[in-house]
Amino acid sequence: MNTLLVYEGKHGFTEKCARLLAEKIPGEVYLLDLRQEEQADPKNYDTVIVGGSVYMGKIRKEAAAYCRVHKQQLLKKKLGLFICCADSEKAEEQAEAAYPAELLQHAAAVAYFGYAFYFERLNFLEKAVVRVVAGANSTREDINTEAMERMCTALYGQ
Ligand SMILES: Cc1cc2nc3c(=O)[nH]c(=O)nc-3n(C[C@H](O)[C@H](O)[C@H](O)COP(=O)(O)O)c2cc1C
């Protein structure tokens, strides 16, 4: 049993979630940051998990592109999808906008893993957006580890 876990974030939270999730997954896990040039073909794996963070209502570009390019293969796999985003009330809506409808329907788990603002890593404009939209002026982190456990149960039955 092996798993491909591909993800794309911008400031490190999605990566942190992917690494935490990988520790909970049984069997072999291949972890891939989609910002790297290398791409992994889903066909060599039993299970595939795709994750990305949301900026201005949209999932990161490479995570979206990976789903588009590999959609047919992903439909043949045990599939998990997750997003990281600050607006928990809109998490479901943003997850639905993030991934193709067929993949959302096919996925054994669609999850929201929480969010972080790593303030020192944000650029000037991002800091301004976070101050205005979320009222945050310093680092915040909220990881939903229960959602990770639920995803593992849905995908691996444990
Ligand atoms: C400039 C900016 C725009 C954002 N836009 C959204 C958004 O539209 N919806 C949302 O729920 N969260 C939004 N967020 C929150 C991010 O999704 C959250 O901080 C996430 O954890 C970032 O993960 P990353 O560090 O892996 O990129 C935004 C954050 C920033 C800094």
Image (cartoon, rainbow, N blue to C red):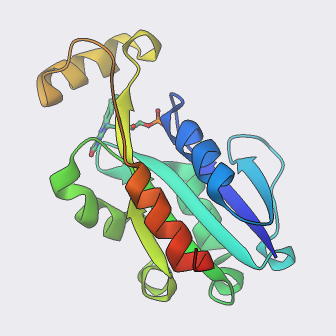
In which quadrant of the rendered view does residue 136 lie? top left
**Coordinates of residue 53 in the picture (x, y in percent):** 44, 46
The quarter in which the C terminus is drawn is bottom right
- Classify the position of ligand 1 by quadrant: top left, top right, bottom left or bottom right: top left
* Residue at the (48%, 58%) spot, across then down: 148
State the count of labels: 0
Q: Nearer the viewer, residue 123 or 151?
A: 151
The answer to whether residue 137 is left or right of residue 78 is left
Identity of the residue drawn at 29% across and 60% down: 94
Asked whether, in this view, residue 40 is left or right of residue 50, the answer is: right
Where, by quadrant of the figure, is residue 70 drawn? bottom right
Tell me where residue 124 sits by quadrant: top left
Q: For the N terminus, give its image quadrant.
A: bottom right
Q: Position of residue 71 (x, y in %)?
A: 63, 79
Residue at 33% x, 17% y: name it.
139
Which residue is more in the foreground, 10 or 144?
144
Q: Residue at x 67, y 52 (%)?
A: 22
